[in-house]
């Protein structure tokens, strides 16, 4: 997820409860190839990962095979364990460029992007799995025609977000379509893993979805917001103090790893997710203290990590 699963958040997740496979935020292959030296430095820093995150997969998007090929070479040099091509992003800017979910309407280009990535990996002398993240269709369910196109180029995995592009995230994910994708894969005798995605709350819910659909796995995205414990297996809800301490740690990692490449405002996306779920309270003198909502308001008014840290440190004490 762009500006969410960046280097700082991935490092935090790895500490609190690492998933089986971790993906970077999606990154423009065009930018990786065309950026000037200063831009290259920023993008490389954004893609930097720690050994604790392995296996870690770089997710790229592009509508230009030659740029995907060169970006794949770079991903190999950076030491990633896999390359994922985003063919599902519904955002207008990405779709208008011919990338993301637009590829559902351009089967030959979709295939050529995978072939180009494979050429890039081969030329760099190191093979790694290529996977694809996509949706069930553009305006309607097109899995019957779309999925065989992807399976033809033999990706290691296809992650199916169980909505169309036009549905965005405005309707419930249709997990019956993930089951349909599994049936299509099996009928064609493909060895590609099918992974489901959409509206999965936690690990227990993921296991239910796997059982219902027959998928090989589940990809969780939005459920990780404010919850680095998601993959740890814990079943109790983190306390307010634990949430605040996790956010403090997240801020420190952001300061260490992202300063100079990412605006501090990006961290504000996380405040609501961390700081929620508890009411206002009173101290031993009967004076009112900030509840979650009031604390969030104060955090959103900050302009620097130091200001947020001062507020949070005072609250946790």
Image (cartoon, helix red, strand yellow):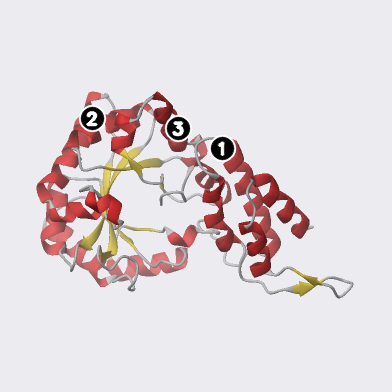
Element assignment for label 2 = helix
Image x and y of residue 153, in percent: 15, 44
Q: Is residue 238 above or below residue 19?
A: below
Q: Is residue 162 visible?
A: yes
Q: Counting other residues with Cα less than 10 Å from the Cα at mark 1, is it few (<14), some (14-19), or many (20 or more)?
A: few
Element assignment for label 1 = loop
Q: Counting other residues with Cα less than 10 Å from the Cα at mark 3, is it few (<14), some (14-19), or many (20 or more)?
A: some
Mark 3 or mark 2: whose residue is earlier in sequence? 3
Q: Is residue 46 above or below residue 236?
A: above
Q: Of the residues tagged 3 and 2, which is closer to the observer? A: 3
Marks 2 and 1 close (CB-CB < 8 Å): no
Residue lying at 64% horizontally and 47% vertically, measured from the top left: 249
Image x and y of residue 203, in percent: 46, 63
Mark 1 or mark 3: whose residue is earlier in sequence? 3
Q: List the residue tagged with mark 3.
A: 42
Q: Quadrant of residue 200?
A: bottom left
Element assignment for label 3 = helix
Marks 3 and 2 close (CB-CB < 8 Å): no
Q: Quarter of the image containing the C terminus?
A: bottom right
Residue lying at 32% horizontally and 73% vertically, measured from the top left: 171
Q: Is residue 228 visible?
A: no
Residue lying at 12% horizontally and 48% vertically, measured from the top left: 152
Tell me the CA gap for discs 2 and 1.
31 Å
Q: List the residue tagged with mark 1.
A: 259
Tell me the CA gap for discs 3 and 2.
22 Å
Residue lying at 18% horizontally and 51% vertically, measured from the top left: 103
Q: List the residue tagged with mark 2.
A: 120
């Amino acid at each position: 997820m762009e500006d969410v699963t960046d280097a700082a958040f991935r490092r935090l997740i790895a500490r609190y409860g690492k998933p089986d496979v971790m993906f970077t935020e999606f990154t423009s292959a065009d930018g990786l190839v065309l950026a000037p030296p200063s831009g290259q430095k920023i993008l490389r820093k954004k893609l930097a990962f720690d050994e604790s995150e392995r296996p870690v997969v770089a997710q790229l998007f592009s509508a230009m095979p030659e740029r995907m090929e060169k970006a794949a070479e770079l991903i190999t040099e950076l030491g990633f364990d896999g390359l994922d091509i985003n063919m599902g992003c519904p955002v207008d800017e990405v779709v208008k460029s011919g990338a993301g979910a637009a590829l559902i309407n351009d089967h030959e280009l979709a295939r050529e992007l995978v072939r180009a990535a494979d050429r890039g990996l081969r030329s760099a002398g190191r093979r790694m799995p290529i996977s694809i993240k996509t949706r069930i269709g553009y305006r309607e369910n097109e899995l019957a025609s779309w999925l065989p196109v992807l399976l033809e180029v033999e990706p290691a995995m296809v992650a199916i977000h169980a909505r169309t592009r036009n549905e965005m995230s405005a309707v419930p994910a249709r997990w019956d379509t993930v089951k349909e994708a599994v049936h299509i894969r099996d009928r064609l005798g493909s060895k590609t893993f099918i992974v489901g995605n959409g509206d999965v709350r936690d690990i227990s819910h993921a296991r239910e979805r796997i059982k219902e659909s027959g998928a090989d796995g589940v990809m969780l995205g939005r459920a990780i917001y404010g919850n680095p414990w998601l993959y740890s297996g814990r079943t109790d809800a983190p306390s307010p103090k634990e949430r605040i301490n996790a956010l403090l740690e997240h801020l420190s990692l952001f300061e260490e790893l992202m300063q100079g490449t990412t605006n501090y405002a990006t961290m504000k996306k996380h405040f609501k997710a961390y700081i929620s779920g508890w009411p206002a309270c009173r101290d031993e003198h009967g004076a009112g203290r900030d509840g979650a909502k009031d604390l969030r308001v104060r955090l959103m008014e900050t302009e620097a990590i130091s200001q947020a840290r001062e507020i949070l440190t005072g609250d946790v004490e």
